[in-house]
Image: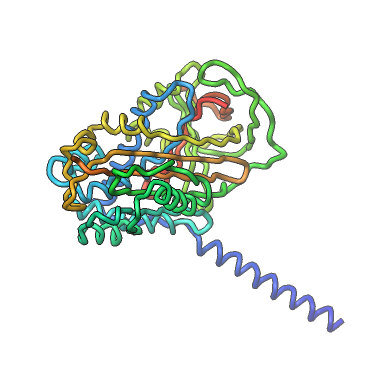
Amino acid sequence: MFTLTLLAAIMMLTNNSSNKIDRSQKDDNVRKNIELTEAQKAISRTSNEFTFDFMKILASKEDKNVNMFASPFSLQTALAMTAEGAVGDTKDEMLKALKLSDFNQADIAGFYKAIIPALEKVDKTTVMEIANSFWSKESIEIKKDYAAILKDNYYAECEKLDFDKKAAAKAINAWCNKKTHGMINHVVDEVSEEQMVALINAIYFNGEWSDPFRERSNYDSEFTNHDGSTKTVTLMRRDDDMDVYLGEEARSLSLPYGNHAYVMTIILPEKGVDVDDVVAKLDTETWRKYRYGGRDYEVTLSLPKFETEYTASDLCIKTLKDMGLQKAFTRSANFTGISKTTLFISQVIHKARVKVNEKGTEAAAVSYIGMELTSSIPRQEHIVFKVDRPFIYAISEVSTGAIVFMGVQKKF
C-alpha cells in the first residue's frame, strides 16, 4: 500500500512538473508587440504602400492567367541598401519610388536595424529569417562608410568575389540556397563580366497554423481558374468561429500562425468580380478593412492546398520604372556613395516560392540587384468561405502590420 501511495505521489509530482514546463514554454512564447519608434512605425506603413503599388503595377503587366507570389518587402530592403550609396537626384528618385522620401537616412537605416531582428524573434515557433549580402568585384574599391552601414544596420555580409561567370553564379546561388533552406536554389545563370556589385536580400518563413487543418477533412472540388477553365483541387476544410470581413467586391479572413504574431490574410473576390480589379484597388485603406474590419462568424472555410513559384526580372524593372525609379537604371546614375567607380543598376531579379498545406506555410523570396559601370453585403450568421476561384493572400506581422509576402492565385 505504501509503495502504491509513493508511486501515485511521484506521478502527481511528475505531471505537475510537466504541466508547469508546458505552461512556462507557452507563456514564454506569448505574442508581444514589436516596439518601434514613431518614425519606424511610419516607415512600416509606407513599406506596405510600396507593396500595394508594386503588386498592382506588376499584375497589370503580367499575363492574366499567371499565379504571382512575391515579397515586395524583400525587394524594398535590397533597394534600400542600394539607396544608401545613392547621391543627389538618383537618391531622391529612389527614396520617392520606395515611399521613403519623407524620412532621413538615419531613420531608414534605423528601421531596418530594428525590424529585421524583431521579425525574426517575435514568435519562437515560427521560423522567420532575413538575410542580406553585398558582393563586390575584387578590382573595385568599396567605401568603408557604406560597407559599415550595411553591416551595422542591415546585418549584411560583405564579400569580395571574383566575378568570373561560373564561379560567381555558383557562390551566389549557394548563398541563396542556404538562406532559403533550399526553397530557392537558383537565382542567376551567370554573372556578367561587366557586373561590379551585387546586393541580395533573402527571406525565409516557415509557420504552422495555430489550429492546423485535419487531413481527413480534405475533399476534392472544382476551382474556377481566371480564364474560366476548371480544375479539380484538394480543399482543406475547417469549421470554426472566425473574424470575416464582408465587402461589396470581396470578403476576407485571417488565419494565425504559432503564437498569432503572423497571419495569412485571404481576400476572396465575390463571384463575378475579377481578382485583378480587387488587386488594382488595394491600398492602405482597403487593406485595413480586409485585415482588421471583420466581425465574428461561424465559418466553414475551404482552402486549397497549393504551391507557387514566381520569378520577375524584366517585368520587375518595368514595374519599378513605372513607380518612378528611372535614373538608377541609366548611365547617368550617381552611386558614388558606394564607390568612386561610377555604377548603375543593370539587373533586378525577384524570385519567390510558397507551399500551403494542412500543417502551415513555407515561403521564401530572394531579391537580387546587379550593378555595372556607367560608362457592403447583408449580414449573415454563418459564412461559407469556399476558396474555389482566384484569390489574393498575404502574410503579415500583427503588431507592426508589416506585409512580408503577397500573392495572387489565379489557376491550378
* Res. 398 visible in picture: no
Instruction: Give the residue at x 53% y 52%.
Output: 258
Task: Quarter of the image for the C terminus: give it.
Answer: top right
In x, y percent, where is residue 11? 74, 74
168 left or right of 254 in image: left
Q: Nearer the viewer, residue 264 or 21?
A: 264
Q: Nearer the viewer, residue 33 or 382?
A: 33
Instruction: Give the residue at x 50% y 54%.
Output: 127
Check the image and name the residue furthest to the left. 88
- Check the image and report above or below for 52 versus 257: above
In x, y percent, where is residue 159? 34, 58
Q: Image quarter for residue 237?
A: top right
In x, y percent, where is residue 145? 20, 60
Instruction: Give the residue at x 32% y 58%.
Output: 160
* Res. 250 visible in picture: yes
Q: How many marks?
A: 0
